[in-house]
Image: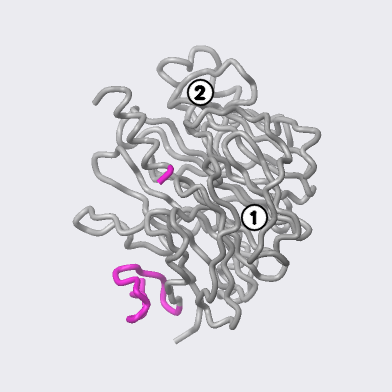
């Protein structure tokens, strides 16, 4: 396989137990006893990142569809009643974030804003530019977007390659800036490609997923869960992967001992993307404050893995266990029926999971038998 084919394959793939109750339309997807998974909507092509408005509206970014959606469950029956297209023709508008009634949208090289969008779902205003000086590289250029406890916007700039040492500091970093687009700064470096992060509810400590490099084998390096409680930390890329795997090409320039190791290693190539600490009260007590992570699934592993939502259990503020929570999108025969991307806690405590392959959102709820 030549380099062009490898890059195209990566781009398409990345831009791309009790049994679920009968009648849910999700045959084969399993969740733990007492939990139920149902289709919320399948009318959001290329559904990616999720954000929640103050009025309960769910906002959905996309990638190859170039659109931003709003989804409403008006009668609160657990199924979407209306889906609005708020913007179209955008450049990979993966990231969405809600703040003070406005919706922020992250494209490859800019962040825009839909002002007071909750009152204008049927007649959305034009997207106004907040910041437009991010690099234009498509490779790992799509951006996740969140509002931090400091009310700043956080957005990553992925490495423009599988493995390289970019000349500009802004690559392979996590940035933050004010909602008006001012005071951009690099919060953390050495991050190959994070497409999901959240703040631990009690400590407000930032945690993020990071996708490891390709072509070091089926089982190396691990994908990562990292924590950045302060600005200025370096997480290894491109010099070090996982805890102590020196890169064959760049490891000689910086030792692993001089970078921050991951707090948790995921299996290689599962592609952990969106993640949320559970802040609801619907789920049993043992799930509260715990971390759910969407694993989008491998694209070039000889035996695929991932394609599921996992629970990362924390104890005393640190991850201690990873176990499947919702799985079955990767079938026994290797067929893939969906690819989880992001996770959102709804006001009633249910979880919403996006799937960019099916263009769908799933709702996971708990009701004891």
Residue 17: percent from left, percent from top: 36, 71
Find out whether residue 31 is within the magenta segment.
yes
Residue 94: percent from left, percent from top: 54, 47
Q: Image point 36% across, 50% down: which residue?
A: 306
* Magenta span of residues: 15-34
Characterize the magenta stretch by its predominant secondary structure: loop
* Foreground of the two, 28 or 63: 63
Q: Residue furthest left?
A: 333
Determine the secondary structure under disc 1: loop
Q: Residues within 10 Å of mark 1 (few under 14, many from 20)?
A: few
* Residue 321 shows in this picture: no
Q: Image point 71% across, 41% down: which residue?
A: 129
Quadrant containing the C terminus in the rendered view: bottom left
Q: Residue furthest top?
A: 252
Determine the secondary structure under disc 2: loop
* Residue 219 shows in this picture: yes
| Disc with the residue nearer the chain's start (2 vs 1) | 2
* Foreground of the two, 322 or 86: 86
Residue 247: percent from left, percent from top: 44, 21
Front: mark 2 or 1? 2
Residue 249: percent from left, percent from top: 43, 15
Find out whether residue 185 is within the magenta segment.
no
C-alpha distance separating marks 2 and 1: 31 Å
Q: Image point 52% across, 28% down: which residue?
A: 137
Q: Residues within 10 Å of mark 2 (few under 14, many from 20)?
A: many
Task: Describe residue 369's horizontal placement relative to residue 159 as left or right.
Answer: left
Judging by the rendered image, the residue that carries numbered circle 1 is 316
Q: Toward which corner of the image does residue 277 lie, by quadrant?
A: bottom right
Residue 28, above or below 311: below
**How many labels sit on residues?**
2
Judging by the rendered image, the residue that carries numbered circle 2 is 238
């Amino acid at each position: 396989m030549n380099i062009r084919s490898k890059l195209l394959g990566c781009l398409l793939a990345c831009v791309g137990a009790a049994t679920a109750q009968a009648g849910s339309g999700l045959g084969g997807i399993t969740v733990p006893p007492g939990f139920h998974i149902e289709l919320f909507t399948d009318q959001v092509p290329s559904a990616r990142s999720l954000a929640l408005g103050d009025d309960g509206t769910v906002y959905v970014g996309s990638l190859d569809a170039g659109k931003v959606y709003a989804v409403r469950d008006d009668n609160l029956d657990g199924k979407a009643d209306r889906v609005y297209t708020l913007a179209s023709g955008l450049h990979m508008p993966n990231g969405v974030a809600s703040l003070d009634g406005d919706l922020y949208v992250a494209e490859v090289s800019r962040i825009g804003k839909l002002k007071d969008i909750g009152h204008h779902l049927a007649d959305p205003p034009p997207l106004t530019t907040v910041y437009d000086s991010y690099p234009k590289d498509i490779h790992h250029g799509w951006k996740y977007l969140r509002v931090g406890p400091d009310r700043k916007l956080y957005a990553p700039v992925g490495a423009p390659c599988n493995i390289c040492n970019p000349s500009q500091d802004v690559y392979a970093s996590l940035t933050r800036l004010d909602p008006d687009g001012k005071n951009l700064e690099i919060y953390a470096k050495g991050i190959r490609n994070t497409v999901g992060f959240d703040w631990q509810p009690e400590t407000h400590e930032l945690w993020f997923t990071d996708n490891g490099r390709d072509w070091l084998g089926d089982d190396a390096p691990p994908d990562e869960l990292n924590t950045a409680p302060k600005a200025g930390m370096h997480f290894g890329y491109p010099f070090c992967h996982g805890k102590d795997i020196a890169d064959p090409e760049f490891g000689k320039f910086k030792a692993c001992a001089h970078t921050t190791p991951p707090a948790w290693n995921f299996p290689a190539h599962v592609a952990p993307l969106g993640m949320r600490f559970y802040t609801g009260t619907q789920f049993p007590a043992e799930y509260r404050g715990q971390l759910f992570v969407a694993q989008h699934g491998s694209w070039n592993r000889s035996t695929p893995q991932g394609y599921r939502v996992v629970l990362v259990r924390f104890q005393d503020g640190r991850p201690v266990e990873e176990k499947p929570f919702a799985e079955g999108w990767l079938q026994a025969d290797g067929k893939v029926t969906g690819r989880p991307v992001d996770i959102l806690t709804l006001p009633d405590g249910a979880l919403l999971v996006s799937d960019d392959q099916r263009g769908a959102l799933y709702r996971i709820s708990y009701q004891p038998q």
